[in-house]
Amino acid sequence: MSTLVSPLATLGAIRRRTTTLALLLTMIAAALVGPSVVAPRLTDSASAAVYSSCTVSRCADARTARSGWSAKGFPTSRGWYSWSGGLSNFAGGRFYNNEGQLPANATYYEYDVYPRTQGAARDAYRIVVNRSSGVTWFSPNHYTDFYRL
């Protein structure tokens, strides 16, 4: 004697398995991608790495930004400044080097690397300039690492 399984019972089992598989895949994806996609990862600046030269990707962009900010006299006031192409760029004001990652006994100012529409969200790319000496540091990850330009 054979047992008949109703099509509705089979459909219900398939849906449960599909839902379980989708949930499992979502959990795996969340574990692999992590919260950094949802929110910026906070890092301990005291563990920042400081490099004597800049060989990472986007160093050329940082040098270009440095030239643009230099042409503006490296403003010290925090705010938006007109940039080429009808865009704006943000000067963040004084960078206090509280964690002591950069050489001490200097006054630093921070500037965004990439221009954007005025008021748009800022990204993590910054240059930090010692206006007295002209020494410039590039941070591609909001002060987790510093590369001397």
Image (cartoon, rainbow, N blue to C red):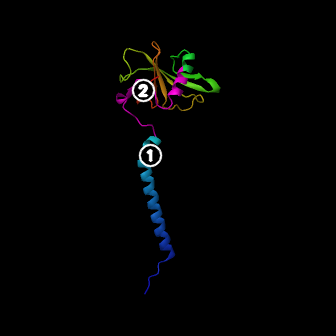
* Discs 1/2, front: 2
The amino acid marked with disc number 1 is: Val
Residue 100 in the image, given as x and y percentages of width and height: 35, 22
Residue 3 sits above or below residue 10 on the image: below
Asked whether 137 or 105 is in front, the reply is 137
Q: Are marks 1 and 2 in contact (CB under 8 Å)?
A: no
Which residue is painted at 50% across and 70% down in the image?
11
Asked whether 7 or 64 is in front, the reply is 64
Q: For the magenta stretch, what is the residue range?
A: 39-66
Which residue in the protein does label 1 denote? Answer: 33
Residue 80 in the image, given as x and y percentages of width and height: 56, 23
Residue 2 sits above or below residue 126 on the image: below
> Is residue 27 covered in magenta?
no
The amino acid marked with disc number 2 is: Phe
Residue 30 in the image, given as x and y percentages of width and height: 43, 49
| First of labels 1, 2 by sequence position | 1
Asked whether 55 or 93 is in front, the reply is 55
Which residue is painted at 62% across and 27% down in the image?
87
Which residue in the protein does label 2 denote? Answer: 146
> Is residue 65 covered in magenta?
yes
Which residue is painted at 45% across and 30% down in the image?
142
